[in-house]
Amino acid sequence: MVLSAKQTLPTKIGLFRRNPSSSLRRSPVSLSFPSTELPKRTVLAVSKPLHLSSLRAKSPVVRCEAYEADRSEPQPIDDAAAAETKSEAAKKLKIGIYFATWWALNVVFNIYNKKVLNAYPYPWLTSTLSLAAGSLMMLISWAVGIVETPKTDFDFWKTLFPVAVAHTIGHVAATVSMSKVAVSFTHIIKSGEPAFSVLVSRFLLGETFPTSVYLSLIPIIGGCALSALTELNFNMIGFMGAMISNLAFVFRNIFSKKGMKGKSVSGMNYYACLSMLSLLILTPFAIAVEGPQMWVDGWQTALATVGPQFVWWVAAQSVFYHLYNQVSYMSLDQISPLTFSVGNTMKRISVIVSSIIIFRTPVQPVNALGAAIAILGTFLYSQGHGGRH
């Protein structure tokens, strides 16, 4: 729109004009604006008459154009978006701390667990002590108010029972394996757990997976087989213990997913309840398989061989077992199953490498190659699996 304005005196434009000697009045001005272009609350007043000449397309003096205030003016900072960005950064830092703690605790547990089993080859009692230590720690935490006591009912314990059975079998089988073979070998075989997961889910639960998942099983199975065939300290009981542990933990994960649906129990308390129920299941079997007399004789032999520090080893392996599992369940509360799976793969690498260094485990190049292939397959599996669960 083009306006041409002429006047001899300065013009003041405002909402209203007040003459000191007269009452408030508006200057009559006649303007023809399309109603859609003029803001509804616009009031135009002038202190001196404004003479309008005819509207002409040539020689424009003033050019009036509409604009959108929200685009032409700077926007205020979105506090909600800024807070959300900070929240995301804090969450990533929290997950990073969880992962680092989880891996460190797992490495320490495996080292002390192997030290105990070398001097005291009673995996059933060792497994029982691990669960007992964790149960005692959580009961004390609930009693003094460090951790809020979970609200559970009969249905909760009923759904937890199959999880506890699978957890107990997996825990004992892994400990039996580590009592017979090197820690690194046990964890190389346990890196084949995804293969068991796919097979169980496919044939027992009827689930289907992308082709990439099935292809990732080739390096997993091939790498584990190559490591087993070239393992210098191969032992069939140790090998079978790791395999049974894989199968048991697959069922534990399946039952755990079903059991945690709709439950308000935190990851920390869920694992605490799991430990207590597993302890009740395991204790009578541990007594039947090994027995108090064997434990007492073995304990005296270990003290005579290692010295008083053996007691510290047992306490450390028991406490660190609970702590690393507790942190892993707390991590699962914060992340997707895919991220957890990748973290678990990286955990195995840290355990394998650290145990080889600390225990000076002899490793042939072909054995190391098999381990690398199996772990690579596990990583590819986690990517192809896409966090389906």
Image: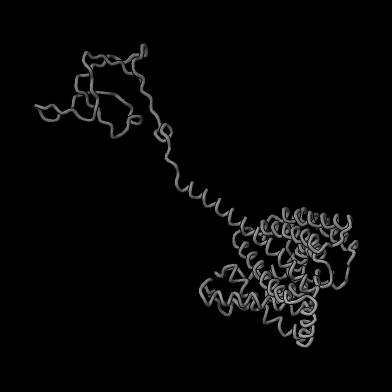
State which quadrant residue 196 falls in: bottom right
The quarter of the rendered structure image containing the N terminus is top left
Dividing the image into 4 quarters, which one contains the C terminus?
Answer: bottom right
Residue 151 image point, x, y percent: 53, 75
Residue 192 visible (yes or no): no
Numbered label tally = 0
Give the residue displayed 61% in from the left and 57% down from the top. Answer: 97
Residue at image coords 69%, 55%: 386
Instruction: Give the colour scheme of this rendering.
Output: one colour
- Relative to 33, say whether 383 is above or below: below
Task: Say whether residue 266 is visible.
Answer: yes
Q: Nearer the viewer, residue 165 or 182?
A: 182
Residue drawn at (63%, 68%) of the image: 326
Is 123 left, or right, of 318 in this rendering? Answer: right
322 with respect to 217 (left or right): left
At which x and y percent is residue 217?
Answer: 81, 58
The residue lying toward the viewer, choosing from 96 and 33, is: 96
Residue 294 x, y percent position in the rendering: 79, 85
Q: Residue furthest bottom?
A: 293
**159 over 388 or under it: above or below:** below
Residues 185 and 109: in front is 109
User: Which residue occupies the extreme left position in the image?
Assistant: 21
Q: Nearer the viewer, residue 183 or 210?
A: 183
- When asked about the image quadrant of residue 174, the answer is bottom right
Q: Position of residue 147 (x, y in %)?
A: 53, 71
State whether residue 251 is above or below residue 98: below
